Amino acid sequence: MSHHCQTSTSTIAAQHEHKGGFCPVVGDTHAYCPHHKGDSRSPCPALNALANHGYLPRDGKNISVFGLIRALVEGYGLSTTLALLLSIGAVFILGQFRKISLADLARHNLIEHDASLFHRDARKGQEYAPRCPDCSLLKAVVHQGGYYKPGRITLEDVANIRAKREVHGPLDFTHAEIARGEMAIAIGVLGGPNADKEGLDLEVLKTWVKYERLPDGWKPDHTQGLYHTYKMAKVVRDRMNAIKSGKLKNVLDEADATEAAMGMSAAHAPQVSPTSQR
């Protein structure tokens, strides 16, 4: 049984091709059009959404480093410095200095990493990791988020979830930084200028991951800079370190223990026969 989320809303338009990165249905706009046959996509919902909205080539192919920088700035409001760092870092890690396709980012253990919040790990020996989000993992994040602010996922939520996800498979330093940074950027960009404190609406996150779609009427409302992103990622890192060192309890472990205890209590509760209730 597949656990992949449905990532296409094909009712928007009949099946068609995005030749040369252009969409014949929505034209030269930033309207949403899901990927179609022949399009290249990555495990990264952020870049896939940029392609689905035409900030990157709709087919996800032949992307230059300058095209990537421009898409991150225009589509998400990243500062030029942050966009430059991410884009040059990506092509350097991939070892592809001319042009890339989004599928190149699925090469295992380069930029892509294990213990993703939304994707299953690559199987042993696989060169490419799964590109589609896993519905059960996404549901778990939506369920586990919102502990501090109902209906919103905060940086503290991310730390708790990441710590739990990495219990059986801690990441190396580089991939740990990537994992924390990508969620800091997601919350910072989609959550608004006060997202470091207020977090991100879980329904927005769910739509962004599941359908790789930006909110209706989307337009960046602030610039997400390098230093601010670093500070947000540091909140996640510091809390994770405190959890791993035992200085701080992970509230998700406590919640699991409570649910387990309630389940055992219900299982051992005396059964009342229908006749005894008369």
Image (cartoon, rainbow, N blue to C red):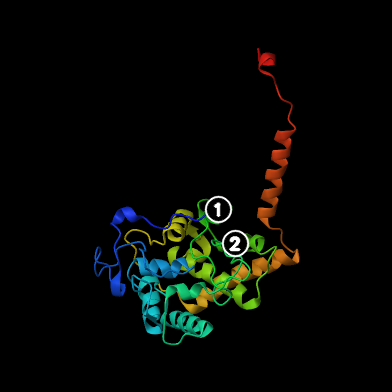
- Is the residue 180 above or below the residue 67 in the image? above
Question: Which residue is found at the position 72% from the left and 66% from the top?
Answer: 244
Mark 1 surroundings within 10 Å by alpha-carbon count, few (fewer than 14), some (14 through 19), many (20 or more): some
Mark 2 surroundings within 10 Å by alpha-carbon count, few (fewer than 14), some (14 through 19), many (20 or more): many
- Is the residue 135 above or below the residue 219 in the image? above
Question: Which residue is found at the position 53% from the left and 71% from the top?
Answer: 128
Q: CA distance from mark 1 to mark 2?
A: 21 Å
For disc 1, the marked residue is 136
Q: Amino acid at mark 2?
A: Glu
Q: Which is more foreground, mark 1 or mark 2? A: 1
The extreme top residue here reads 278
Residue 158: where, in percent of width, then height?
58, 62
Residues 85 and 15: in front is 15
Mark 1 vs 2, N-terminal side: 1
Question: Which residue is found at the position 67% from the left and 14% from the top?
Answer: 275
Residues 210 and 182: in front is 210
Residue 212: where, in percent of width, then height?
42, 62
For disc 2, the marked residue is 156
Label 1 element class: helix
Residues 33 and 180: in front is 33
Q: Is residue 192 visible?
A: no
Residue 46: where, in percent of width, then height?
44, 68
Q: Quadrant of residue 67?
A: bottom left
